[in-house]
Image: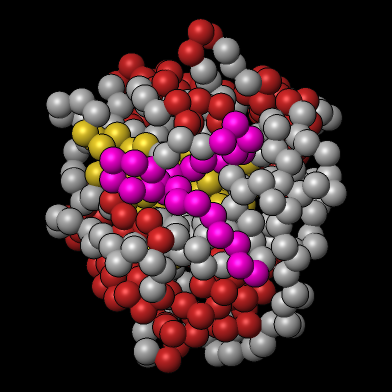
């Protein structure tokens, strides 16, 4: 979810629209000056984390079909991983840049928590604002994932090739292009349009790949104005029909696997942590091979009660489920690279929109989520601790 406004004279900062009290994940989607998220309208399957209605059940996916991958397709093992990779990720502060003292504080916290992947925002193709952050992450053995921020899904502004060359030299290999294109507010046209999304994504992906990076596809909202599974399936079909499937040779699939109030093993439909299994079946059905799937947003939040068949999520249960989501990575599928909790910090890192406050692990006044100490304990003890 993503909106940006000029909150300070020289600092652009993403925001989201105000949300109901029981909105477990008001992530980044919205309109410039209002809100990144756009009201979810699940029509046939995935419910949005902010939706209060019970998610609709989805039909079972057909068995994967087999198709021939292109000869230039990068295998899973060719994609870069951080040293000592454990699949633990987190979304960084929801601003486009931070001062060194903020970077130092939260890189230190992330390292102590055992985090190995960090998703951060970059202002279009602007070079320089995140040099210090990237250097500190790489120095601490953490893999940076750059989300190139573009308001409302408009085409990327600036020299994308130069950006990728610059940051690849610093250690950024993964570049998420565009965000939640199945939402009205993330499209310049005001509605999801798969062909226009591909018209923007394919040229940008080719530039990223030609300059040493790995382009991210999707980052679909789990229940937008167009269902995420439908969008993914049709988008892959269109790439094949257009003769542009080779643009996926070095691509990875960005995923937002919010849990709602569902248990970790919920598998009746894709509305939960296991969303990557649904995405993988679609990818294999259309491409005949897996793609790396990286969770760039996800989590569970106290008070969530979208599915009335399950109890509301208590603070204690939230901690258990989020920690278990990280523990799952010990036995993760080979194509599932990382789970990233949304959000490490908001006001404490310079964010100003209180819609994000309840999602942050570090809050004003010195409050720190019990998730932090639980992850630090697991990291310090080699994850042998039973939560």
From this view, report whether residue 101 is shown above or below residue 85. Answer: above
Q: Position of residue 124 (x, y in %)?
A: 23, 50
Furthest residue in direction top, as rendered:
365
- The answer to whether residue 131 is left or right of residue 378 is left
Rendered residue at 77%/25% (across/down):
316
The image quadrant that residue 63 belongs to is bottom right
Q: Tell me what residue is drawn at x 48 percent, y 31 percent.
A: 356
Q: Quadrant of residue 305?
A: top right
Tell me if I can see residue 189 in this picture: yes
Q: Main secondary structure of the magenta part?
A: loop
Q: Residue at x 73, y 82 (%)?
A: 62
Question: Can you say whether 236 is above or below 361 in the image?
Answer: below
The verdict on residue 34 being magenta is yes
How many numbered circles does the render carry? 0
Residue 174 placed where, x, y %? 40, 54
Asked which colour scheme the image uses, the reply is: secondary structure
Q: Residue at x 85, y 49 (%)?
A: 309
Whether residue 146 sits left or right of residue 71 in the image: it is left
Name the quarter where the C terminus is drawn.
top right
**Extent of the magenta region:** 20-44
Instruction: Please state which of residues 244 and 20 is positioned toward the viewer in this rendering.
Output: 20
Q: Which of the pair 23/64 is nearer the observer?
A: 23
Q: Percent x, y for residue 173?
A: 37, 53
Report x, y in % for residue 69. Answer: 52, 85
Check residue 182 for magenta coloring.
Answer: no
Asked whether residue 254 appears in the rendered view, the answer is: no
């Amino acid at each position: 979810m993503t909106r940006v406004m000029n909150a300070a004279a020289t600092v652009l900062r993403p925001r989201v629209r105000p949300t109901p009290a029981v909105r477990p994940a008001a992530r980044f989607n919205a309109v410039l000056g209002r809100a990144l998220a756009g009201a979810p309208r699940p029509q046939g399957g995935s419910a949005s984390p902010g939706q209060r209605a019970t998610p609709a059940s989805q039909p079972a996916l057909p068995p994967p079909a087999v198709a021939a991958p292109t000869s230039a397709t990068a295998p899973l093992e060719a994609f870069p991983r951080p040293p000592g990779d454990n699949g633990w990720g987190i979304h960084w502060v929801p601003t486009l840049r931070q001062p060194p003292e903020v970077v130092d504080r939260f890189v230190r916290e992330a390292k102590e928590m055992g985090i190995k992947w960090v998703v951060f925002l970059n202002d279009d193709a602007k070079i320089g604002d995140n040099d210090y952050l990237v250097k500190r992450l790489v120095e601490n053995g953490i893999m940076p994932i750059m989300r190139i921020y573009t308001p409302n899904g408009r085409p990327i502004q600036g020299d994308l090739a130069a950006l990728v060359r610059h940051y690849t030299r610093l250690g950024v290999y993964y570049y998420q292009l565009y965000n939640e294109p199945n939402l009205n507010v993330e499209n310049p046209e005001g509605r999801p349009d798969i062909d226009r999304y591909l018209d923007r994504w394919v040229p940008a992906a080719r530039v990223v790949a030609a300059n040493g990076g790995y382009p991210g596809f999707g980052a679909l909202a789990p229940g937008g104005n167009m269902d995420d599974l439908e969008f993914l399936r049709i988008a892959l079909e269109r790439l094949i029909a257009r003769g542009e499937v080779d643009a996926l040779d070095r691509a990875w699939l960005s995923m937002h696997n919010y849990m709602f109030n569902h248990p970790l093993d919920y598998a009746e439909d894709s509305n939960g942590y296991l969303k990557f299994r649904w995405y993988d079946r679609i990818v294999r059905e259309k491409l005949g091979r897996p793609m790396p799937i990286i969770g760039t947003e996800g989590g569970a939040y106290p008070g969530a009660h979208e599915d009335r068949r399950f109890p509301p999520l208590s603070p204690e249960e939230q901690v258990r489920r989020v920690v278990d989501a990280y523990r799952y990575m010990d036995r993760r599928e080979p194509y599932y690279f990382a789970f990233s909790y949304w959000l490490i910090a908001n006001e404490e890192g310079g964010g100003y929109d209180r819609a994000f406050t309840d999602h942050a692990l570090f809050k004003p006044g010195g409050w720190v989520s019990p998730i932090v100490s639980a992850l630090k304990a697991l990291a310090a003890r080699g994850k042998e601790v039973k939560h």
